[in-house]
Image: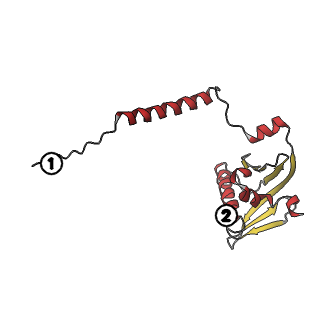
């Protein structure tokens, strides 16, 4: 009695057709956005400008690494230290992650830490952080209420 042992792996025709269809749909959707048939996702700064949404409050911030591993959050205009972030429980983990990404982008542009970051609370409730050095903008509400609050506490209105 001999057993036939086959190592050939085949994928059924219906599975291949479904995979090909998925690739084709993806390419068609991408092309439809590229050619303007489907509108691109809204850019928050453009939408605010179109709808006349104004800033309620803006504060310029600087972030400085300390020798003990903490990060100091400083009002860039008054040089007042607003907070010293020591760990994860004080919102420092999210703030550190955002700032690491922005610092990496500054290095790619050959910029240092001199230019402040502009934290803005908008009339519609949005909160954005703009790197005044590179122009990169981050909508902080996109990361959930706790992470938004980690930055919102640095606004003057939050401190009164």
Q: Crowding near pointer 1: few (<14 within 10 Å), some, many (20+)?
A: few
Residue mark closest to the camera, 2 vs 1: 1
Q: Residue 141, how many percent across, how many down?
A: 73, 51
Q: Say whether marks 2 and 1 touch (CB < 8 Å).
A: no
Residue receiving disc 1:
3
Eyeballing the image, is 22 above or below 144? above
Q: CA distance from mark 2 to mark 1?
A: 60 Å
Nearest the viewer among 103 and 20 is: 20
Q: In this rendering, would 17 be left or right of 55?
A: left
Residue receiving disc 2:
93
Q: Residue 47, how many percent across, how many down?
A: 78, 37
Residue at horizontal 81 percent and vertical 61 percent from the top: 153
Which of the 4 image quadrants contains residue 160?
A: bottom right
Residue at horizontal 85 percent and vertical 41 percent from the top: 53
Nearest the viewer among 129 and 74 is: 129
Q: What element does badge 1 sit on?
A: loop
Which of the 4 image quadrants contains residue 154?
A: bottom right
Eyeballing the image, is 135 above or below 34? below
Here the colouring is secondary structure
Eyeballing the image, is 132 above or below 25? below
Q: Residue 56, how many percent across, how many down?
A: 88, 49
Q: Earlier in the sequence, mark 2 or mark 1?
A: 1
């Amino acid at each position: 009695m001999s057993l036939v042992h086959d190592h050939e792996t085949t994928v059924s025709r219906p599975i291949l057709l479904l995979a090909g269809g998925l690739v084709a749909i993806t390419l068609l959707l991408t092309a439809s956005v590229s050619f303007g048939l489907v509108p691109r996702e809204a850019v928050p700064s453009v939408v605010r400008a179109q709808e006349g949404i104004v800033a309620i409050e803006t504060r310029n911030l600087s972030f400085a690494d300390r020798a003990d591993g903490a990060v100091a959050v400083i009002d860039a205009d008054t040089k007042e230290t607003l907070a010293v972030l020591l760990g994860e429980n004080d919102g420092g983990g999210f703030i550190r992650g955002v700032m690491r990404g922005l610092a990496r982008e500054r290095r790619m542009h050959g910029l240092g830490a001199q230019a402040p970051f502009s934290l803005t609370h908008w009339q519609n409730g949005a909160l954005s952080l703009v790197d005044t050095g590179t122009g990169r903008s981050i909508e902080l509400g996109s990361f959930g209420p706790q992470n938004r609050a980690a930055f919102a506490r640095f606004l003057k209105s939050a401190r009164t």
